[in-house]
Image (spheres, rainbow, N blue to C red):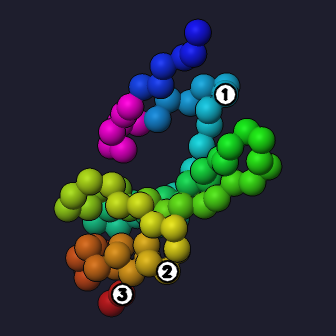
Amino acid sequence: MRKRHTIRSRDEPAQATARHVQPRKLLKKAGGVEMWQVEVRGQPWRNASALQYEIVGGPGPTAVFSKPHEAFAYFQKIVPARHAGGS
């Protein structure tokens, strides 16, 4: 019998189990918005993993990008200028 996979929203916290762990690294945080780097594991028969970038806490659902410069440009766009680290 096959296991049934549950579908969850991107806003729900991922529960870390021994079989399914996505290493995450907080890259930036400003004005209640966070930019995360997430390692996404490939299929078990492949030894490859990919990186994706998530923007959490923005005006809508979690935004996911495959390229870091696109994620950072979006992060700068939605974070108010006073929180962006500039003077």
Residue annotated with mark 2: 69
Considering the image in quadrants, where does the C terminus appear? Answer: bottom left
Q: Is residue 55 visible?
A: yes
**Residue found at the far front of this picture:** 1
Examine the image and state in which quarter residue 48 appears.
bottom right
Considering the image in quadrants, where does the N terminus appear? Answer: top right
Residue annotated with mark 3: 86
Label 1 vs label 2: CA separation? 31 Å
Q: Amino acid at mark 1?
A: Arg
39 within the magenta span? no
Front tag of 3 and 2: 2
The answer to which of 77 and 52 lies nearer the viewer is: 52
**Residue found at the far top of this picture:** 1
Examine the image and state in which quarter residue 11 appears.
top left
Q: Amino acid at mark 2?
A: His
The reply, left or right, for residue 7 in relation to residue 17 is left
Question: Main structural element of the magenta stretch: helix, strand or loop?
Answer: loop
Q: Secondary structure at mark 2?
A: helix
Image location (x, y in percent) of residue 43:
68, 43
Residue annotated with mark 1: 19
> Total of numbered circles in the picture?
3
Q: Are marks 3 and 1 in contact (CB under 8 Å)?
A: no
- Which segment did they paint magenta? 7-13
**Residue found at the far bottom of this picture:** 87
